[in-house]
Image (spheres, rainbow, N blue to C red):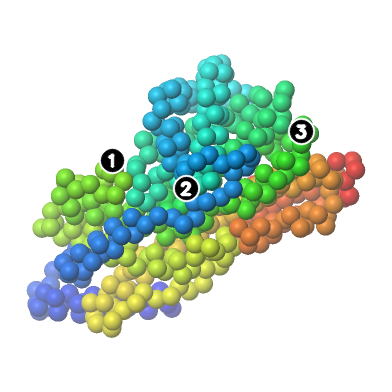
Amino acid sequence: MAALKWIAVFVAMACVAIFVRLQCTATAVEPMTTAAAFSYLVTPDELATYKTQLLATAGERSARCARPVLRGQPLPGPALTDQLAFETDAPLSSCLAAWRNTLDELPATEPTPRQVEVIGRCAAPLEAAVRAATGHAEGCSAHGLGGPEPSEQSTVLFVGQLLGRRARQLAISDPQAALWMLLDVIRLGQDHARGRTDLMLAMIGTAIASGAVEHAHAILDTTKPAKLDELAAALEVLLASEPSFGEVAASDTPRVAIDFALSGLEPDSWVPPGGKRKQHAQPIDASDPDRYGGAMQLMAFSRLAPLKIAHACPADASLGGCFNGFTRPAIPVPSDGTPRSLVQQALVEATMSQLVFTLRDYVVKRAQHHSDLIALRLHVEAMRHGCDRRALTELATTPALGDAVQVTYAADAFVVRPPAWATSAIPAEPLTRRIACPPTGTP
């Protein structure tokens, strides 16, 4: 019923607004696309205000970049320069290009001969670069809102792939060093998703961390490393410094608006915050009602959507809190009651309803991966002290998740699953983790 109500409001108000704006009779009005309608719904003064607000948003700096280093003393300054080294340092970028060129080979459990050669030549400098990039006290994404465009979105993903393979090799002789390498990669992935970045880059960061967690579980399945207390402490730090999903969700729409709307409304010589990007829209002719109106629509949406997102999923909210926020009815877009304002309101609400479904899916995916990181902490705990149910229950929840993972027990193992709300939409229950109980454990 609510959806039908919004459709009715949209149709009625659109007719009224377009009729008033064009001062025409019903017989003179030609069919008009939604995008073209925005050419009449957004005034030049409003567009100037939207632009000012959008650029001010892009110029803001995240207040959530600080997080503890995993070991040792933090390096001075923010991590930006060391994060960009994977793209700007010629030896590192050539290593990653060489690795990328091996990925056309058939997938295999073990690295191919070409991959073994690249790993042998490149793992050490890449590991050192990861240590540097994650060793600062501040670690937000280098490519956040207002930052430079990545040379290639998958660059950092290649770092995680190569070092994940190297860690599995190293685990044969030194599982402790292999696991620390993977913990640094997890932190690299977290930092890639931290701050005011967009959803795509944030999910790439999640994929980097998830791959490293998968390798770490596989190593612990076959080997008991030394100094488990240090590993447990580092995992506690990682769990406590999960990047804010709400901050990313609210930053994604302004990023899209700059790339696909504002860049097309400005002269070709215009340089946005962070510099030109390959995907920026070409200059839009104001006489093209569809393209020009579409840019108006995106500019209007970029002003209102972050407010609604922040209400449903604040920057300090847990993943469970964001899921619940995106499930509840959202606060309505403000309107001054005029027909034109009501039409804008209805159009933004209709677009927002689709975005909310997407954001909720992203929250579920992030929660699944965070749950697997919790499972890794439980894996280490089982090796430290056996499968004591009380101890494992205390470790089954984190503030970032806002809930507890599901833990079920068998005679010789326990199984970790994400919370029910993070699995209900996924039929195969992904990221279910079975962890063996040592003989001394309490099943």
Question: Alpha-carbon distance for marks 2 and 3?
Answer: 31 Å
Rendered image: mark on residue 140 = 2
Q: Looking at the picture, tell me which residue is in the foreground, 362 or 219.
A: 219
Q: Nearer the viewer, mark 2 or mark 3?
A: 2
Which callout, 1 or 2, points at the residue further toward the start of the chain?
2
Q: Looking at the picture, tell me which residue is in the foreground, 10 or 200.
A: 200
Relative to 399, say whether 77 is above or below.
Answer: above
Q: Which residue position is annotated with label 3?
A: 225
- Residue 278 figure quarter: top left
Rendered image: mark on residue 278 = 1
Q: Mark 2 is on which residue type?
A: Cys
Mark 3 falls on what kind of element? Answer: loop
Residue found at x 13% / y 53%: 285
Residue found at x 80% / y 41%: 383
Q: Residue furthest bottom?
A: 337
Mark 1 falls on what kind of element? Answer: loop
Which callout, 1 or 3, points at the residue further toward the start of the chain?
3
Determine contact: label 1, label 2, CB under 8 Å. no
Residue 438 falls left or right of residue 207: right
Relative to 9, say whether 347 is above or below.
Answer: above
User: Which image quarter holds the N terminus?
Assistant: bottom left
Residue found at x 19% / y 48%: 270
Question: Alpha-carbon distance for marks 1 and 3?
Answer: 46 Å
